[in-house]
């Protein structure tokens, strides 16, 4: 009977437990992460009674948590994958819509801009059309700026998202570590039986963690779990956890990176994080946001640079050289915004780097890293980050700035204490779209016209025709001066197959160019390029004639003869040749010029050197002629020993027959020019002259010195200069109206009106105009005073001129005056040397330098800056002219070239502006589509895995209800067994009463 009671009680107890567990399942059917629990029964050990083994009831072996680790691991992986693609697709979709939307995208703005440009090309004289062009240009700039602002805003948003997600990861890691401790304690307290509900809580936290980042879970022997993220970074180790946080990146301070802190050690793990919302956010930044910013920036830079370059090749409505249409891509602000020093670079923080765009067509969309890997402080390397390709390894030379040219841009190390371990992030295109700004402010500034015009002489006998010409470089000496072609050019055919290219400054007396371009070959019947192209040769030009501090006094005979000298000091000239195959530099013996050597002599010596061809020319200007109206002594002037003021008989052989025989009073520049050009000795020497009525210009085509001697009354004479104008370049604001020599100007309003000018042998000088000038005379005097106060030291007087285009220039002129009966005045002027070096040859001046060449000569291309074609049949004597285009208001040749840029391959060598932007939109759209497809696919996989987990571990209420009835019946039956045991006991007691 006792055994029967014990059996009934055990059944009652276990089925009560089963009912409790079943009820627990039912009540937690809606609890997220809950795993169904099951009671495991086991029979008690039997008793040996009456020779047989009799059962002893039942007990609870365990309450088992129905949980499949493999399925839950798969669930975490699928959850992480889905959240990664979902985050990427959501963010990428916003960028895709932004770029492709006609209301915000760049493409409609480009179409309207080039449509307005075509309207100005069709009607270049219309100022309203030019106003519309400027308006559409501003609209295009605004679209670039708007998209850039949205992208920057998106970057700030994801910075905030990364902060929140990183905080959630740390919070979950802390909670998992606490549960590890509780589970370990509970398991040990329950003799190895695990606390199922705590296990469910931990599993749910891990699932929530997998929504944020991909995790790797490792089971410990003591019921704890280790949780790893990234590349094995331990978020949780047993009961300990580490912190994940977001903060400003070390390379780019505008964006956050993900950092992992373990004790005192902090590690940047941004590149190692995958999966989950955080991985999707980083994927979006890396695969969508950065490429979009860089791609859009590259397109913006290409438009800005190429449009500016072409615009500068034209002239505007007022005939002035074209300025940058948009703000320069290499403005001081822009070049400083493309490089960032790493926050961990050692002190002092004094490194200065700038990044200059050299060829927008060669730019990529990658960022770059400039690093100093050591072991010394001089070695550095540049790596392209898109594929981690090492582009160059170099060493500091010790001379700043030092430049590194790669892939369309130039890194300039401006100065600072660069050290081993330094890192710099170089982003050539990142800010490009935010820096598009229209530079022009007036419709008249739009440069639609070409600066050159061509024409054929009316009397040409041949059928050859000349092209309008194409300008490709406006910075050559021929196009350097505002409002003129210097010099105008005459092409004269000497036979049907040969021609000369001449300086046509004086149309009545064309002279060879400097250097000469004579007897050029021409092929009849085909198109011939008339001017030399860029053959890789380089031109170096000397300063020109040295104006002495005073003229030389010659006492009357029998005093010794005193010769005037040109003032050239000896100079040490080195010619070097760099061998490309080996990099070896060969240096020729130093040429030391003779003191007072003529330009012709110096050019002759240089031409004897390998790889060098030199020519010389001497130019002297005489102006401000004065002569006593009641002369006591006649004014006598001789040049190079030839008297220009003599009176000869009818049989003279000194001059051509049509020479001016009568010496006028006063002597005029026109008379002297005619005498010089008619002199047969000068003709043989190649000395020519021209006059504009007020100034006499004498040119020795072979570079011989030109000397003058003058006698006459005191004060008779003229001013002498070397003919080189020194131009003032505006470095501040331009005056609101063009300056002229008649009207004054108020410089106290607006400004600053600052200018810079270069003086050969002395360097650069600066001045600022701030006063008010009532008339042109006061204006010229004020400018002269500012020049004199700038620190420049010049012999003679400063003669200021304002050109028709409103440009300021000056020459220093030395007065040369007769000395009356006490002798004569003399002066000698040297010439200019132009050195043409073959490719890989260079000219250098050994210290200390002197007054012939600059101390550091800078070579320039030998091309003219424009191409001219002539085709057809030419005859001897046929002439064609190339002049400055005076009709800029009705010419739109440069406008046509600007319009052609719309379809030119200006981006990445093979795409146009529109194609580049369309390709960017296409790439972002494709990536967004892939992300959406991957999101949908991963969603299906996640649902399947979730269903499998639910099927395995979830609560089925029907099944639980069935179990509830089953256990209730078993419970009642066990109670009945107890009742039977009681009845048996009662019967037994009553039997013995």
Image (tube, grey):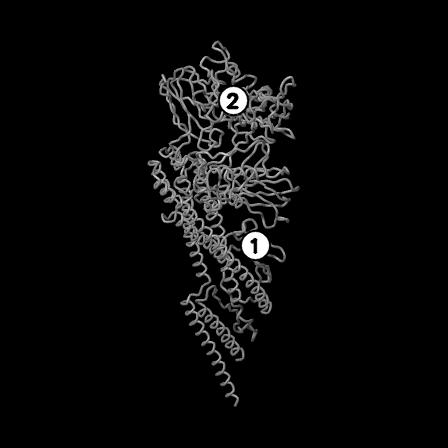
Residue nearest the observer in this picture, 216 or 956: 216
- Residue 416: quarter of image: top right
Counting from the top left corner in percent of width and height, residue 76 is at 49, 57
State how many labels appear: 2
Above or below, 507 relative to 732: above
Judge the density around disc 1: few (<14), some (14-19), many (≥20) Cα neighbours within 10 Å: some
- The reply, left or right, for residue 480 in relation to residue 604 is left
Q: Secondary structure at mark 1?
A: strand
Callout 2 secondary element: strand
Judging by the rendered image, the residue that carries numbered circle 2 is: 699
Looking at the image, the residue that sits furthest to the bottom is 993
In the image, residue 35 sits, relative to residue 100, either above or below, namely below
Which residue reaches farthest top?
651
Is residue 173 positioned above or below 125 on the image? below
Residue 644 % position (x, y): 52, 18
Q: Is residue 509 above or below residue 477?
A: above
Residue indicated by mark 1: 259
Residue 301 visible in the picture: no
Left or right: residue 677 compared with residue 418: left
**Do the residues under discs 2 and 1 have CB atoms within 8 angstroms?**
no
Using the rendered image of the protein, determine whether residue 526 is visible from the camera's viewpoint.
Answer: yes
Task: Of the two numbered discs 2 and 1 on the same chain, state the one appearing first in sequence.
Answer: 1
Rendering coords of residue 962 (x, y %): 41, 69
- The residue closer to the viewer here, 93 or 50, is 93
Depth check: give the residue in front, 795 or 281: 795
């Amino acid at each position: 009977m006792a055994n029967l009671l014990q059996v009934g009680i055990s059944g009652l107890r276990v089925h009560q437990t089963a009912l409790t567990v079943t009820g627990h399942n039912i009540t937690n059917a809606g609890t997220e992460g809950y795993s169904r629990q099951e009671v495991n029964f086991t029979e008690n050990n039997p008793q040996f009674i009456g020779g047989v083994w009799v059962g002893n009831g039942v007990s609870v072996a365990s309450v088992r948590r129905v949980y499949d680790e493999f399925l839950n691991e798969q669930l975490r992986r699928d959850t992480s994958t889905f959240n990664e693609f979902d985050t990427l697709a959501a963010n990428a979709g916003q960028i895709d819509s932004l770029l492709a939307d006609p209301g915000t995208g760049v493409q409609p703005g480009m179409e309207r801009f080039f449509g307005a440009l075509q309207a100005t090309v069709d009607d270049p004289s219309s100022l309203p059309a030019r106003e519309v062009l400027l308006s559409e240009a501003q609209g295009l700039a605004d679209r670039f700026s708007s998209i850039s602002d949205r992208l920057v805003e998106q970057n700030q948003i994801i910075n905030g998202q990364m902060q929140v997600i990183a905080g959630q990861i740390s919070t979950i890691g802390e909670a998992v570590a606490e549960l590890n401790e509780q589970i370990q304690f509970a398991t040990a307290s329950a003799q190895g039986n695990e606390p199922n509900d705590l296990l469910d809580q931990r599993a749910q936290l891990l699932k929530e963690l997998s929504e944020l980042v991909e995790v790797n879970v490792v089971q410990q022997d003591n019921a704890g779990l280790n949780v790893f993220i990234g590349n094995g970074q331990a978020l949780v180790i047993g009961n300990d956890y580490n912190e994940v946080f977001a903060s400003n990146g070390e390379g780019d301070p505008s964006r956050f990176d993900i950092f992992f802190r373990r004790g005192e050690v902090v590690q940047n793990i941004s590149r190692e994080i995958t999966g989950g919302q955080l991985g999707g956010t980083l994927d979006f930044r890396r695969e969508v946001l950065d490429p979009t910013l860089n791609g859009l920036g590259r397109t913006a830079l290409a438009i800005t640079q190429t449009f500016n370059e072409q615009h500068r090749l034209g002239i505007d409505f007022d005939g002035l050289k074209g300025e940058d249409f948009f703000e320069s891509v290499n403005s001081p602000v822009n070049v400083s915004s493309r490089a960032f020093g790493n926050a961990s670079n050692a002190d002092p923080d004094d490194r200065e780097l700038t990044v200059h765009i050299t060829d927008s067509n060669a730019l990529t969309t990658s960022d770059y890293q400039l690093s100093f890997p050591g072991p010394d402080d001089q070695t550095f390397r540049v790596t392209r980050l898109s594929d981690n390709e090492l582009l160059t390894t170099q060493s500091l030379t010790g001379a700043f700035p030092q430049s590194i040219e790669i892939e369309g841009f130039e890194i300039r190390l401006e100065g600072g204490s660069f050290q081993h371990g330094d890192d710099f992030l170089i982003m050539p295109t990142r800010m490009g779209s935010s820096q598009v700004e229209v530079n022009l402010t007036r419709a008249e500034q739009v440069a639609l016209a070409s600066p050159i015009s061509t024409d054929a002489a009316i009397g040409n006998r041949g059928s050859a025709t000349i092209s309008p010409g194409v300008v490709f470089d406006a910075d050559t000496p021929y196009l350097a001066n505002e409002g003129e072609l210097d010099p105008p050019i005459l092409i004269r055919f000497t036979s049907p197959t040969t021609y000369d290219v001449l300086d046509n400054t004086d149309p009545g007396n064309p002279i060879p160019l400097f250097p000469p371009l004579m007897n050029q070959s021409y092929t009849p019947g085909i198109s011939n390029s008339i001017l030399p192209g860029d053959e890789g040769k380089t031109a170096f030009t000397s300063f020109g004639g040295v104006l002495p501090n005073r003229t030389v006094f010659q006492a009357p005979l029998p005093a010794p003869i005193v010769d005037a000298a040109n003032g050239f000091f000896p100079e040490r000239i080195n010619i070097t040749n760099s061998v490309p195959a080996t990099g070896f530099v060969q240096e020729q013996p130093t040429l030391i010029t003779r003191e007072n050597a003529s330009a012709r002599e110096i050019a002759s010596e240089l031409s004897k050197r390998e790889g060098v061809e030199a020519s010389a020319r001497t130019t002297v200007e005489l102006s401000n002629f004065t002569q006593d109206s009641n002369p006591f002594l006649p004014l006598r002037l001789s040049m190079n020993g030839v008297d220009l003021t003599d009176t000869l008989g009818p049989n003279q052989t000194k001059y051509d027959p049509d020479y001016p025989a009568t010496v006028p009073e006063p002597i005029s520049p026109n008379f002297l020019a005619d005498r010089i050009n008619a002199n047969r000795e000068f003709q043989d020497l190649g000395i020519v002259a021209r006059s504009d009525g007020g100034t006499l210009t004498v040119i020795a085509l072979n570079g011989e010195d030109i000397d003058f001697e003058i006698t006459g009354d005191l004060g008779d004479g003229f001013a002498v200069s070397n003919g080189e104008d020194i131009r003032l370049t505006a470095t501040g604001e331009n005056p609101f109206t063009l300056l002229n020599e008649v009207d004054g100007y108020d410089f106290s309003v607006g400004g600053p009106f600052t200018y810079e000018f270069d003086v050969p042998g002395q360097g650069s000088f600066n001045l600022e105009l701030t006063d008010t000038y009532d008339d042109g005379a006061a204006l010229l005097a004020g400018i002269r005073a500012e020049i004199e106060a700038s620190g420049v030291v010049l012999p003679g007087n400063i003669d200021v001129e304002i050109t028709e285009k409103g440009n300021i220039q000056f020459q220093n002129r030395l007065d040369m005056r007769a000395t009356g009966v006490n002798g004569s005045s003399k002066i000698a002027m040297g010439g200019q040397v132009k050195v043409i070096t073959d490719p890989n040859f260079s000219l250098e001046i050994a210290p200390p330098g002197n007054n012939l060449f600059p101390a550091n000569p800078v070579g320039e291309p030998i091309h003219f800056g424009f191409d001219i074609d002539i085709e057809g049949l030419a005859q001897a004597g046929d002439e064609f002219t190339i002049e400055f285009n005076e009709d800029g208001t009705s010419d739109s040749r440069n406008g046509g070239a600007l319009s052609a840029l719309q379809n030119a391959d200006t981006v990445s060598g093979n795409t146009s502006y529109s194609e580049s932007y369309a390709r960017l939109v296409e790439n972002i759209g494709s990536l967004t589509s892939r992300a959406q497809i991957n999101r949908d696919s991963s969603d299906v996989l996640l649902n399947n895995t979730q269903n499998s987990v639910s099927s395995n571990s979830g609560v089925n209420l029907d099944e639980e209800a069935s179990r509830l009835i089953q256990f209730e019946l078993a419970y009642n039956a066990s109670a009945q067994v107890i009742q039977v045991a009681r009845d048996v006991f009662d019967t037994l007691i009553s039997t013995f009463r």
